[in-house]
């Protein structure tokens, strides 16, 4: 079940510092598109279209880097 509280973890700050502003921005915007179980489609091209279709700074490569770094953290 999806936790109903917002984490105060420093991991989000570490994510933004490591992948840059667009990566951190994308990560937070993506949260609004999660399903009830906290899941979302994993294809970077699909995520780009869902979350930030008209923002040129958020590319599928930025999404891949962000997801990879988030997985590490």
Image (spheres, rainbow, N blue to C red):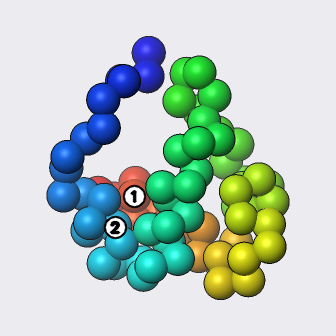
Seen at 30% across and 29% down, the residue is: 5
Question: Within the image, what quadrant is residue 24 found in?
Answer: bottom left
Seen at 45% across and 79% down, the residue is: 21
- Residue that badge 2 annotates: 15
Extreme top residue here? 1
Is residue 47 rendered to the left or right of residue 22? right
* Quarter occupied by the N terminus: top left
SS state under label 1: helix
Seen at 56% across and 55% down, the residue is: 29
- Residue that badge 1 annotates: 70
* Quarter occupied by the C terminus: bottom left
| Marks 1 and 2 close (CB-CB < 8 Å) | yes
Is residue 43 rendered to the left or right of residue 36? right
Q: Vertically, is 34 above or below 71?
A: above
> Disc 1 and disc 2: Cα gap in Å?
6 Å
Is residue 48 rendered to the left or right of residue 39? right
SS state under label 2: helix
Is residue 35 rendered to the left or right of residue 19? right
Q: Is residue 45 visible?
A: no
Query: Residue 69: percent from the left, percent from the top?
Result: 40, 65
Q: Is residue 55 visible?
A: yes
> Which tag, 1 or 2, sits closer to the chain's start?
2
């Amino acid at each position: 079940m999806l936790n109903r509280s917002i984490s105060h973890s420093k991991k989000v700050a570490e994510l933004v510092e490591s992948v840059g502003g667009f990566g951190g921005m994308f990560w937070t915007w993506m949260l609004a598109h999660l399903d009830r179980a906290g899941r979302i489609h994993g294809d970077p091209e699909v995520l780009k279209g869902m979350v930030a279709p008209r923002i040129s700074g958020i590319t599928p490569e930025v999404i891949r880097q962000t997801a990879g770094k988030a997985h590490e953290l």
